[in-house]
Image (cartoon, grey):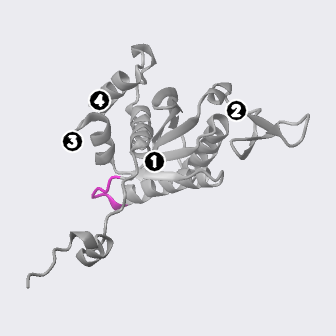
Amino acid sequence: MFLCKFPGLNYCIFRGRDINFAFMDPQVRKYERVIMGIDPGTNVMGYGVLGVNGKTPEVVVMGVIQLSRFDSHYLRLRRIFERVTSLVDQYLPDELAIEAPFFGKNVQSMLKLGRAQGVAMAAVLARDIPIAEYAPLSIKQSVTGRGSASKEQVATMLQHILHIPQGDMPSLLDATDALAAALTHFYESSKPALAKGPSSWAQFLAQHPDRIAPRRK
C-alpha cells in the first residue's frame, strides 16, 4: 500500500520507507517480503532478488555487475555503490544477504574484495536495510546439503528448488551464488525461534526447583 506524502510527486511511503516509485519495479508490490542477495567481487559482482509470499520464495531477478572494464580499483568501487543503490531503489529489498569473503593467501586480493563488500553494504545501509552475512560454506550447506558443493551444483539445486527455466539460468555463476545467499537467508530467518535455555546448572535448578530430589534422612 502506498501513502503519498506529496501528491503529484513520485515520493511515497511504501512498507514504512520513503521511496521514489518512479524507479521501482512494479512486480515487487505483490510480495510480502523481498530479499536481496549479493556475491561480492572486484571483476564481477553477482546479485539476486527473491520475492516471498508466506513460505514460498520465487525469483524476481538475478544478474551481475560487470566491473572488469574499469582499470582503476576505485572506479570499480564507485560503480558498485552506484549499481547497488540503483538495485535497492528498483527492487526495494527488506533485507540483504551477502556472502562473506573467503580468506585466501593473496592479501591484496582479499583487501580489494573486502572493500567491494564494504561498499555494497554501505549502499544498502544508506537505505536503512538490515544485513545478514553468511560464509560460503554455510550457503552451500543450506542450499545443497553439502558444504563442499561446487558452484555448478549450487546453481543446479537452485534451479530445482525455485523452478527456474533453463533459458533463464545465467551464464555467470556469480548471479546464482548471490541468489543462493538470499535463499539461505530465507531459510535461516524462517526457522522458528528456540527458547533460550539456562546458561548454567545453578540457573536450571533455580528455574526448576521441582526437579531437585529431596535429601535422604
Residue 89 picture quarter: top right
The amino acid type found where label 4 is placed reads Glu
Give me the disc on residue 24.
2
Give me the disc on residue 148.
3
Image location (x, y in percent) of residue 67 = 51, 41
The residue that mark 4 highlights is 152
Image location (x, y in percent) of residue 215 = 13, 81
Residue at 42%, 20% (x, y): give it: 164
- Precedes in sequence: disc 4 or disc 2: 2
Mark 1 and mark 4 in contact (Cβ < 8 Å)? Answer: no
The amino acid type found where label 1 is placed reads Ile
Image location (x, y in percent) of residue 18 = 75, 46
Give me the disc on residue 73.
none
The amino acid type found where label 2 is placed reads Met
Secondary structure under the numbered disc 1 in the rendered image: strand
Mark 2 and mark 4 in contact (Cβ < 8 Å)? Answer: no
In the image, residue 24 sits, relative to residue 191, either above or below, namely above
